[in-house]
Image (cartoon, helix red, strand yellow):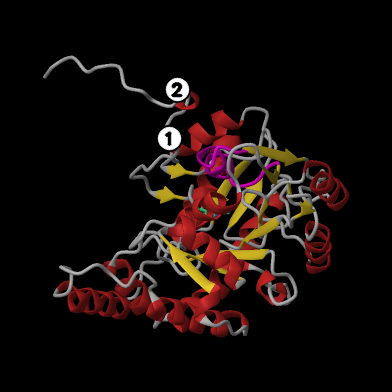
Amino acid sequence: MNQSPLLPLREELAAVTPYGAPQLEVEARLNVNENPYSPSPEMVADIAKAVARVGAGLNRYPDRDFVELRQALADYLLLECGHSFPVQHIWAANGSNEVMAQLLGAYAGPGRIVLGTEHSYSMYPEYVRGAHSRYVTVPRQSDFNVDLTVLTGALQDLRPSVLLLANPNNPTGTVITEADLKQILQVAQQTGPIIDGESTATVVVIDEAYGEFRDSGQPSALALLEKFPHLAVSRTMSKSFGMAGLRLGYLVAAKTIIYDIMRVRLPYHLSALTQAAAIAALSHASEQLDQLAQLRKRRDKLASWLAAQGYVVPKTQANFVLFGPFENRHKVFNDLLERGVLIREVGPTGFLRVSIGSEREDQAFRAALEEATK
Ligand SMILES: Cc1ncc(COP(=O)(O)O)c(C=O)c1O
């Protein structure tokens, strides 16, 4: 092969490495907040049938507007939280990662600011870089809850075009109360960039990737959509639904927001296979939702156990627990890995995050942590 020529890589990418947590074949994989349960044999059979059915039509492009899938997602939302949305308010893409990238493609861009909070999802800065915008974060309180005064102050001072808030937050597991969320949304009505002399709204993205794990009585931000048309609620089938391998994330928002996303999406971004598999998987929604109670119970048990070991453990409503602080978290991470337990070194200095696994994985984690720290 000829010597490769120098390629015109974008200058700002020179120091960037590809993002991704380790994918290792170990006894307990507790580092990316997956659902530990495989889909049921019935669900797998239905997915296989659905994929076989569309196979004969793969010479054609898929339904660009994936109307049947949007309806299946609407039916799921009605079941999960009792809110009914017409398909025009629903959007989907290959993981909520792609949904976010599309949102920022429409509303961020050069010269604009995207606001977030510290100790939040580590992909947010990556999305923002892809949109050529500036990511600014505000501090959280010492218990890792959102600091409402600081956040609303930053909205007013910085005029961001987008605010990204994960709720429950990754990696802290903490949630924003509905009262705080309403206040943020109220302030954000007028804090976007000034365009042609007029204040725009900041688009507030509530990332509910872990929404289904919230405690009962904690409402979803979906309840606020009618009142706040600058709100967009992002969700995914990767976590509670146990379909991380499917790559299906979705968004619920006002029709104008969905239309703005359509301005930047690539046509046919959701393959016919993805659409068929997702519709088949969604027909098993009730059994997936039934599993959640078990996972929540084990999460609370693990959080209590970690607290009883003397760690600081923020109250979590997701499928993971943050714990610490350790003087040398990297050593603890490695000591666990040596024992076949993979967790995540992420978030506030000295803290580690562990996902809720199967019963066996949870046991392996506890045993490994006890050994590593005795
Ligand atoms: C807060 C948050 N948002 C979004 C995602 C991305 O999910 P998806 O698999 O739908 O791209 C994750 C994945 O870990 C996450 O933690």
Q: Residue at x 74, y 56 (%)?
A: 200
The residue under label 1 is 338
Which is nearer the N-term, disc 2 or disc 1?
2
Magenta stretch?
A: 118-133
Tag 1: residue type? Glu
The residue under label 2 is 14
Q: Residue at x 35, y 71 (%)?
A: 39
Residue 237: in sight, yes or no?
no
Measuring from the top left, give residue 364's x and y in whole percent: 47, 51
Q: Is residue 157 above or below residue 92?
A: above
Q: Nearer the viewer, residue 257 or 241?
A: 257
Q: Residue furthest left?
A: 1
**Dot 1: within a 10 Å radius of its alpha carbon, few (fewer than 14), some, or many (20 or more) residues?**
few
Q: Nearer the viewer, residue 296 or 372?
A: 296
Q: Of the numbered discs in the image, which one, if any, rests on residue 356?
A: none
Q: Residue furthest right?
A: 149
Q: Residue furthest top?
A: 3
Q: Tell whether circle 2 marks a residue whose Cβ is less than 8 angstroms from ligand 1.
A: no
